[in-house]
């Protein structure tokens, strides 16, 4: 019987992962914990020369930012410095035809903020534009604000928990699964509240922040996938499955 992997992300954003894992002989079950609502913020006309950097802490924010620019007929200058929290986020920027000037060394918003502060040196005359979700964790903004760097957050989407009754109804039809994959702290929070015995199976966290959220919620030793790319996800999922096989082997002895 093929191993079953439960992915808690929105189905339209999990297709790429599902295709990869299926080719490796795994069966995929999707049970999204949240749904996101696209926003179309309408700030005053953007003046690109007032920003020293545009910083991204997720691939989703990159994709939605360039879609928003297209919708509102904004053209990001070719020489605008762009910062990415990780290599996978940088790849998303490059896919839109832009060069990444700074990639986070430790894949956390806090560290990316420290790197930006060093890059800006003592120049605080301009702002950092920060496209993100409404509920994106604030450590990136907090570090910059503490260093007197002005941040303008551009809220492009809102993540909301799906109704618990809706999730439980789908959960009842899921059946057996071996590993659970989480891509955001918000999904961890909903899972912990809605699902009975939430940490009875090995968990894979996409990103360090999601890993921390799992540990805080009570998950013991989640497998953390630091980059949101296919190879890293496959490796992390395989490690989690190894934990399943070891546990079954021990119980059969």
Image: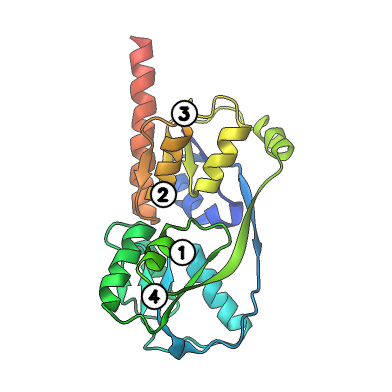
Task: Give the camera-side residue of 20 and 33.
Answer: 33
Task: Give the camera-side residue of 135 and 79.
Answer: 135
State the image coordinates of residue 43 (x, y, percent, origin top left).
62, 80
| Disc 3 + disc 1, Cβ < 8 Å | no
First of labels 3, 1 by sequence position: 1
Tell whether 247 sits left or right of 162.
left
The extreme top residue here reads 253
Q: Which mark is residue 201?
A: 3
Q: CA distance from mark 3 to mark 1?
A: 27 Å
First of labels 2, 3 by sequence position: 3
First of labels 2, 4 by sequence position: 4
Q: Which mark is residue 94?
A: 4
Q: Nearer the viewer, mark 2 or mark 4?
A: 2
On the image, numbered disc 1 is attached to which residue? 59
On the image, numbered disc 2 is attached to which residue? 209
Question: What residue lies at 33% left-to-right and 45% top-to-bottom?
Answer: 235
* Element marked by disc 1: helix
Q: Nearer the viewer, mark 2 or mark 3?
A: 2
Is 25 placed above or below 90 here?
A: above
Q: Which mark is residue 129?
A: none
* Element marked by disc 4: helix
Question: What residue lies at 56% left-to-right and 81% top-to-bottom?
Answer: 69
Task: Give the camera-side residue of 79 and 87.
Answer: 79
State the image coordinates of residue 189 (x, y, percent, origin top left).
55, 40
Is 48 placed above or below 180 here?
A: below
First of labels 3, 4 by sequence position: 4
Is 198 placed above or below 52 here?
A: above
Q: Mark 3 packing: few (<14 Cα in 10 Å), some, or many (20+)?
A: some
């Amino acid at each position: 019987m093929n191993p079953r992997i439960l992915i808690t992300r929105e189905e339209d954003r999990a297709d790429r992962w599902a295709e990869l894992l299926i080719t490796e002989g795994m069966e995929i079950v999707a049970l999204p914990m949240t749904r996101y609502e696209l926003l179309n913020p309408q700030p005053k006309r953007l003046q690109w020369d007032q920003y020293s950097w545009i910083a991204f802490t997720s691939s989703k924010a990159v994709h939605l930012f360039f879609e928003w620019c297209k919708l509102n007929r904004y053209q990001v200058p070719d020489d605008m410095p762009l910062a990415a929290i990780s290599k996978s986020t940088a790849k998303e920027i490059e896919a839109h035809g832009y060069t990444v000037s700074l990639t986070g060394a430790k894949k956390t918003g806090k560290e990316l903020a420290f790197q930006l502060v060093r890059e800006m040196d003592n120049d605080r005359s301009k702002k950092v534009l920060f496209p993100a979700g409404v509920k994106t964790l604030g450590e990136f903004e907090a570090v910059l604000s503490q260093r007197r760097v002005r941040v303008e957050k551009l809220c492009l989407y809102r993540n909301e928990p799906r109704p618990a009754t809706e999730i439980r109804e789908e959960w009842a039809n899921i059946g057996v699964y071996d590993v659970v994959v989480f891509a955001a702290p918000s999904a961890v929070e909903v899972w912990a509240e809605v699902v009975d015995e939430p940490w009875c199976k090995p968990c894979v966290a996409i990103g360090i922040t999601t890993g921390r959220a799992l540990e805080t919620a009570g998950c013991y030793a989640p497998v953390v996938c630091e980059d949101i790319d296919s190879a890293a996800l496959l490796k992390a999922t395989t490690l989690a499955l190894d934990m399943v096989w070891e546990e079954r082997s021990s119980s059969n002895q």
